[in-house]
Image: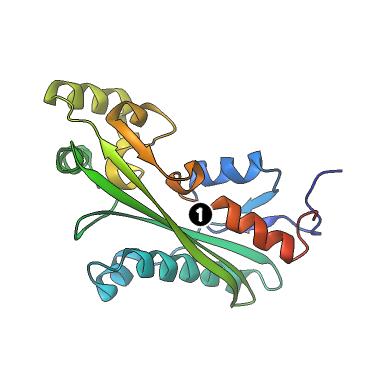
């Protein structure tokens, strides 16, 4: 018998492979139901310098949207924001945009803020956010192009154009923060709340 005590799997309102893997590695069974919301509009309404608030609002909006389709189920929404000073980054739409983001982040320390929301029947049962700081090394243009060639389309699948769990690790000289938070899911507070809800063995 595993540690999961709920009758049904946790519903993950995200298509992120990293979030899926983090939850499964922690012994949490999941059902994937990606949310369909207009993230950029919500970000624009909140404005700059609101990374934590935007991540929380988006995590809650995603979970609530999926909750409407699955009454009675426990839904986990998540979102991540990358900021460099006052600049807020979004997923790059193409290779050129990914390269531009990495040029901006090169040699700099940026901040990743990851938020979650646990929702049932539209009610937010818990929501919080954690942050980490990451410093990119001052890599050459030649390395940058070799990196983009190596990762291919994956450069457009995450904010900042990197996955720290893969080849993106070569971009960095220092990482400060919880690994799961960096990958997009503040896992320890989520697990603590799932225990309080009786979903996990205590």
Which residue is located at x 52 percent, y 53 percent?
A: 186
As drawn, 76 above or below 166? below
As drawn, 177 above or below 117? above
Q: How many marks?
A: 1
As drawn, 13 above or below 45? above
Q: Position of residue 130 (x, y in %)?
A: 45, 57
- 173 to the left or right of 34: left
Q: Position of residue 201 (x, y in %)?
A: 80, 53
Residue in front for this viewpoint, 172 or 46:
172
Quarter placement of the C terminus: bottom right
Q: Secondary structure at mark 1?
A: loop
What residue does disc 1 label? 14
- 48 to the left or right of 56: left
Q: Quadrant of residue 190?
A: bottom right
Which residue is located at x 32 percent, y 63 percent?
A: 51
Q: Position of residue 80 (x, y in %)?
A: 40, 55
As drawn, 2 above or below 164? below
Quarter placement of the N terminus: top right
Which residue is located at x 31 percent, y 51 percent?
A: 111
Which residue is located at x 46 percent, y 61 percent?
A: 129
- Local packing at callout 1 (Cα closer than 10 Å; few below 14, some 14-19, many 20+) is many
Q: Quadrant of residue 189?
A: bottom right
Residue in front for this viewpoint, 137 or 69:
137
- 68 to the left or right of 57: right
Q: Position of residue 14 (x, y in %)?
A: 51, 54
């Amino acid at each position: 018998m595993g540690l999961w005590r709920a009758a049904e799997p946790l519903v993950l309102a995200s298509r992120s492979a990293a979030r899926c893997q983090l939850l499964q590695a922690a012994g949490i069974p999941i059902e994937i139901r990606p949310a369909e919301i207009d993230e950029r509009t919500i970000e624009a309404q909140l404005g700059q310098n609101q990374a934590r608030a935007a991540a929380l609002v988006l995590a809650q909006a995603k979970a609530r949207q999926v909750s409407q389709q699955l009454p009675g189920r426990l839904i986990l929404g998540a979102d991540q924001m990358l900021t460099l000073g006052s600049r807020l980054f979004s997923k790059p739409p193409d290779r050129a945009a990914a390269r531009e983001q990495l040029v901006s982040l090169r040699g700099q320390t940026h901040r990743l803020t990851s938020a979650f929301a646990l929702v049932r029947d539209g009610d937010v049962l818990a929501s919080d956010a954690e942050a980490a700081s990451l410093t990119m090394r001052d890599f050459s243009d030649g390395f940058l192009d070799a990196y983009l060639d190596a990762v291919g389309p994956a450069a457009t699948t995450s904010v900042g154009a990197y996955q720290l769990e893969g080849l993106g690790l070569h971009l960095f000289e220092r990482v400060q923060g919880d690994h799961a938070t960096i990958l997009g899911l503040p896992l320890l507070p989520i697990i603590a709340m799932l225990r309080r809800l009786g979903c996990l063995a205590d």
